[in-house]
Image: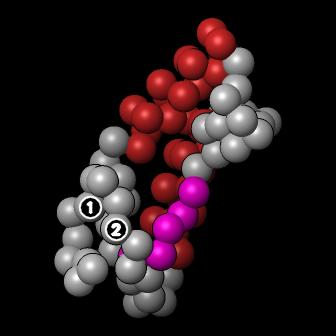
Amino acid sequence: MRFGALIDTQAYFARINEVNHQGPTLRAVIEMNPSALQQAAALDLERRLFGPRSRLHGIPIFLKDNIATLHEEGDCSC
């Protein structure tokens, strides 16, 4: 990981905002995890203190809106 989970997550959010809200009316991203930045900062700290859990430790991911997650706030019909 070149910069860290927090910076990577901020970059993801900026790109999603640019494509989803400022470009054509795609609205492909319905919701984003409101605690993602806090989680990324915690993962960066954990990585610094204890090392990575795995190769994907702190890498932000993008899930399609039809996959339910614990923080789900949208209208998934799952």
Question: Relative to residue 23, is residue 68 drawn left or right?
Answer: left
Q: Which residue was labeled with disc 1?
A: 72
Residue at horizontal 54%, vertical 28%? 43
- Numbered label attached to residue 39: none
Placement of the N terminus among the 4 image quadrants: top right
Residue 3, image quadrant: top right
Task: Give the Cα separation between the discs numbered 2 and 1.
Answer: 6 Å
Label 1: few (<14), some or many (≥20) within 10 Å? few
Placement of the C terminus among the 4 image quadrants: bottom left
Q: Is residue 32 above or below residue 78?
A: above
**Is 62 one of the magenta-colored residues?**
yes
Q: How many marks?
A: 2
Majority SS type along the magenta span = loop
Q: Which residue was labeled with disc 2?
A: 68
Q: Mark 2–mark 1 contact, CB under 8 Å? A: yes
Which percent across, then down, holds residue 73?
21, 63
Residue 68, image quadrant: bottom left
Q: Is residue 62 above or below residue 12?
A: below
Q: Secondary structure at mark 1?
A: loop
Residue 20, image quadrant: bottom left
Is residue 2 visible in the rendered structure shown here?
A: yes
Which percent across, then down, holds residue 7?
60, 38
Q: Secondary structure at mark 2?
A: loop
**Is 14 one of the magenta-colored residues?**
no
Residue at horizontal 64%, vertical 21%? 47
Residue at horizontal 70%, vertical 26%? 52
Q: Which residues are magenta?
A: 61-65
Which is more toward the observer, 11 or 49? 49
Residue at horizontal 65%, vertical 37%? 57
Q: Is residue 32 above or below residue 3?
A: below
